[in-house]
C-alpha cells in the first residue's frame, strides 16, 4: 500500500486550497454541506480528502468521500470503521480503490480552464496512492447528513 506522506499532504493541500475550494463549476464544485466537513477533515495531518460527493441533492442516492491516510493511522481507521458500520447504516461501504471518472461526466459537466486545474481531473498521479472510500446509498437526506457528520468525526480524529 502507498500511504500519505508529509510531502504528498502538502501537494494535496495546495490543490485543495488553490483549486478545489474556489471551484465554481456547477458539476465539479464541492457539494452543498461538504465544504466545512472537508476543511475539517483536511486539518488532520494523517488524512487527506481526494474526491467527494453529497448525494440526494442531485437526485442521486450515493454520498462518498475518497481519502488517503498515513500508515500510522491505518489500523485505527479499520477499528473505527467497524463501529461506524454497526451504528445505523444499512448500505455503507468501505473500499480501497480510486474513483473512476467517466468521459460522459466531462461531457455532462463541461470542462473549462478552472476544472482543468483540479488535480483529480488533470493529474494522472492524483490517485497514485492507496485510496480509501466511505460510501452510503440511500435517498433519505437525513441519513446522508448523519453519514457525512459521522465521517467527519471519524476522519478528523484519527
Image: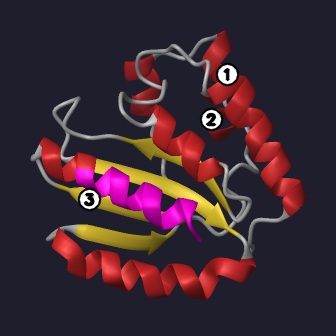
Disc 1 crowd rating (10 Å Cα; few below 14, some 14-19, many 20+) is: few
Question: Residue 93, how many percent across, how many down?
Answer: 32, 70
Question: Residue 99, how many percent across, how many down?
Answer: 49, 54
- At horizontal 84% and vertical 47% (from top left) the residue drawn is 10
Asked whether the viewer can see residue 152, the reply is yes
Magenta span of residues: 146-158
Q: Disc 3 versus disc 2: distance between alpha carbons? A: 23 Å
Q: Mark 2 points at which residue?
A: 121
Q: Mark 1 points at which residue?
A: 116
- At horizontal 75% and vertical 42% (from top left) the residue drawn is 13
Quarter of the C terminus within the rendering: bottom right
Q: Mark 3 points at which residue?
A: 136
From the image, give the main secondary structure of the stretch colored magenta: helix
The disc, 1 or 2, on the residue closer to the chain's N-terminal end is 1
Disc 2 crowd rating (10 Å Cα; few below 14, some 14-19, many 20+) is: some
The secondary structure type at the circle numbered 2 is helix
Residue 87 drawn in magenta? no
Is 137 located above or below residue 58 in the figure? below
Amino acid at each position: 500500500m502507498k500511504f500519505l506522506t508529509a510531502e504528498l499532504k502538502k501537494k494535496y493541500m495546495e490543490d485543495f486550497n488553490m483549486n478545489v475550494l474556489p471551484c465554481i463549476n456547477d458539476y465539479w464544485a464541492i457539494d452543498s454541506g461538504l465544504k466545512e466537513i472537508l476543511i475539517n477533515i483536511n486539518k488532520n495531518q494523517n488524512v487527506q480528502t481526494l474526491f467527494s460527493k453529497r448525494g440526494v441533492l442531485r437526485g442521486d442516492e450515493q454520498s462518498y468521500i475518497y481519502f488517503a491516510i498515513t500508515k500510522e493511522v491505518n489500523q485505527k481507521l479499520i477499528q473505527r470503521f467497524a463501529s461506524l458500520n454497526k451504528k445505523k447504516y444499512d448500505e455503507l461501504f468501505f473500499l480501497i480503490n480510486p474513483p473512476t471518472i467517466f468521459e460522459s461526466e466531462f461531457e455532462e459537466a463541461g470542462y473549462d480552464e478552472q476544472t482543468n486545474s483540479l488535480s483529480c481531473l488533470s493529474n494522472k498521479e492524483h490517485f497514485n496512492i492507496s485510496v480509501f472510500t466511505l460510501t452510503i446509498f440511500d435517498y433519505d437526506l437525513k441519513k446522508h447528513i448523519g453519514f457525512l457528520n459521522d465521517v467527519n468525526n471519524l476522519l478528523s480524529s484519527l
